Amino acid sequence: MASKPTLLAPEALQSFLSQHTEWKHEGGMIRRTFEAPTFLAGIAFVEQVAQAAEKADHHPDIDIRWRKVTLALVTHDAGGLTARDTALATEADRLFTEATRAR
């Protein structure tokens, strides 16, 4: 059986948030809303995040409202935030930057 992931130290969370200012710590999760140029671009971004999440075996809560996509991350089996959350958040940032730069 795999060991339970280690929770992020408060300093590590603050470091992540200071480097990724669009992400907010709310309700025990890290959360960010991305605004795509079109509805279909938002859906394409969700597909990319879904592929990355599946590969990492770590799945965010995803809320889609027209062109706005909100991701919320927490490691449920650890009972809080772990490096898995910040890694997927960083990957989502990269995917969004790449997708919007291509347009």
Image (tube, rainbow, N blue to C red):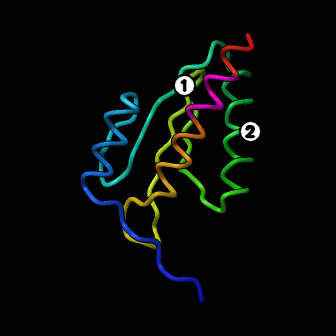
Left or right, 64 with reference to 40: left
* Mark number, residue 68: 1
- Quick one: SS at disc 2? helix
Between marks 2 and 1, how big is the CA–CA gap?
Answer: 14 Å
Q: Residues within 10 Å of mark 1 (few under 14, many from 20)?
A: some
Looking at the rendered structure, the kind of residue marked 2 is: Glu
The main secondary structure of the magenta stretch is: helix
Q: Residue at x 45, y 67 (%)?
A: 76
Viewer-proximal residue among 31 and 98:
98
Viewer-closest of 30 and 62 = 30
- Farthest-out residue, bottom: 1
- Residue under label 2, please give it: 47
Left or right of residue 99: residue 92: left
Q: Which residues are magenta?
A: 93-98
Residue at image position (50%, 35%) is 70
Give the x, y percent position of residue 96.
Answer: 62, 27
Query: Residue 72 vs residue 41: left or right?
Result: left
- Image quadrant in which the C terminus is located: top right
Q: Position of residue 2 (x, y in %)?
A: 58, 83
Residue flagged by tag 1: what amino acid is it?
A: Lys
Residue 32 lies, with reference to residue 75, above or below; the image says above
**Which of 4/42 is in front?**
4
Q: Position of residue 10 (x, y in %)?
A: 25, 55
Q: Is residue 8 magenta?
A: no
Quadrant location of residue 46? Answer: top right
